[in-house]
Image (tube, rainbow, N blue to C red):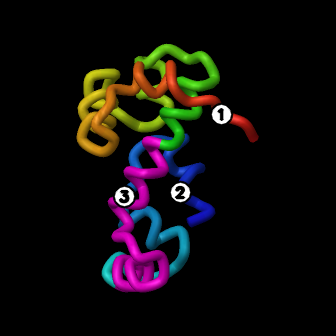
Amino acid sequence: MNLIPDLIAEGAVGTGELAARVGISPSRLTHLFTTEVGLPVRRYVLWQRLLAAVIAVAAGRDLTTAAHAAGFADSAHLTRTCRENFGLPPSALRRNISWHR
């Protein structure tokens, strides 16, 4: 789980790459991750990408920059994914979310 944000920043996150970094097979990683985390690797990665995009938007980045930084192809891809998962476009998240760390 700790590797995923760095892999997102580097580009696409594949189960094979993640498994290689932790020294187990992709099938074993998929099984262990789902058992221990309660989500499949791909779903967890998607949530982390959405979180990265929302943080970037909340920090004032435009949607295209936020989308690319989080590993989405473009702002339209980010918008579709936000609508599918939250029922809102990322522009609505920008207006309605305050991010405090």
On residue 99, which mark appears?
Answer: 1
Where are the magenta residues, as a range?
28-50
User: On the image, which quarter does residue 86 sit in?
Assistant: top left
Q: Main secondary structure of the magenta part?
A: helix
Counting residues from the start of the chain, the first of labels 1 and 2 encountered is: 2
Q: Amino acid at mark 1?
A: Trp
Question: Which residue: 28% across, 37% down?
Answer: 87
Sequence order check, earlier mark of 3 and 2: 2
Q: Quadrant of the C terminus?
A: top right
* Mark 3 vs mark 1, CA separation in Å: 28 Å
Percent position (x, y) of residue 4? 53, 57
Residue 9 vertical position relative to residue 13 in the rendered view, above or below: above
User: What residue is shown with label 2?
Assistant: 4
Earlier in the chain: of badge 3 and badge 1, it is: 3
Relative to residue 50, is residue 5 depicted above or below? below
Residue 4 shown left or right of residue 33 in the figure: right
Q: Residue at x 56, y 17 (%)?
A: 61
Query: In the rendering, at what x and y percent does residue 99 appear?
Result: 65, 33
Left or right for 89, reference 37: left
For label 3, the residue is 14
Secondary element at tag 1? loop
- Expressed as whole percent of the image width and height from the top left, the position of residue 15 reads 37, 65
Q: Amino acid at mark 2?
A: Ile
- 26 with respect to 19 (left or right): left
The residue closer to the viewer here, 86 or 33, is 86
- SS at mark 3 in the image: loop
> Which residue corresponds to the image point at 31% horizontal and 81% vertical from the top-left?
27
Please give the name of the residue rendered at 53% of the width and 24% of the height, measured from the top-left corner: 57
